[in-house]
Image (tube, rainbow, N blue to C red):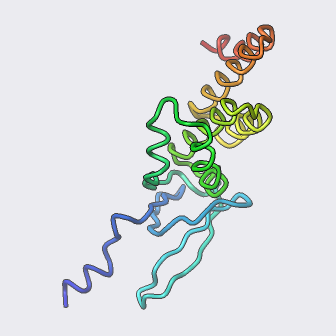
Amino acid sequence: MLLAFALFTLPSFAQDQITRNDNKVIVGTITGVAGGQVSYTQTSPSGGVIKVSLYLTDIKSVTMPVPPEVAKINANPNPDSAQAIATLEPVVRQFAGLPCDWVGESMAKLGDAYAAAGKADQAAVMYAQIKQLYPKSGFVNLATASIARQSLDAATIDEAIATRKPTVDKA
């Protein structure tokens, strides 16, 4: 009987953890981000599934395992752009804005994949989204460097220098 109680009260290792600003930890399965809210599900003690939302502004941090297909793309320094786009687009669409490092990394990889595929406009949108959603993260520097690299590839050196100037001035 004690074992059954322990199994129902201990979180599964496959579940995600959301730490709120008040340090309360919520265990569940994150299903997506939309409208400034993180949606997740939890299993009730009776076995039912509860769907809940929490504002991003109320979240301090998130622990969520990297999906294996995303980890494979993110680990490759030069992934095939078509494969990276096919893998990362739906994941980024679902989780963009989640305060989880692998999401920001996936957004940067997706922007780079768009650039490599000749989709400069989509790459620029992705880099701008990184700057908007993760303004205090290292992913902003990745986005800025990628924008500068695109400018250099397009032979617009003045634009590349102007893009990197704010970062250089901070250093």
The image quarter containing residue 159 is top right
Q: What residue do we see at 61% from left, 49% from top?
A: 86
Relative horizontal placement of residue 8, taking residue 15 as reference (left or right): left
Q: Position of residue 152 (x, y in %)?
A: 72, 13
The image quarter containing residue 154 is top right
Q: Nearer the viewer, residue 66 or 114?
A: 114
Q: Position of residue 42 (x, y in %)?
A: 49, 76
Q: Count numbered badges in the picture.
A: 0
Q: Nearer the viewer, residue 138 or 78?
A: 78
Q: What residue do we see at 70% from left, 61% from top?
A: 34
Q: What residue do we see at 47% from left, 66% from top?
A: 26
**Quadrant location of the C terminus?**
top right
Q: What residue do we see at 54% from left, 55% from top?
A: 21
**Residue 11 drawn above or below residue 5:** above
In the displayed image of the protein, which residue is found farthest to the left?
2
Q: Position of residue 146 (x, y in %)?
A: 66, 24
Relative horizontal placement of residue 120, taking residue 49 as reference (left or right): right
Q: Position of residue 22 (x, y in %)?
A: 51, 58
**Quadrant location of the N terminus?**
bottom left
Relative horizontal placement of residue 96, taking residue 9 as reference (left or right): right
**Residue 93 drawn above or below residue 130:** below
**Residue 44 drawn above or below residue 61:** below
Q: Nearer the viewer, residue 151 or 33?
A: 151
**Residue 103 drawn above or below residue 166:** below
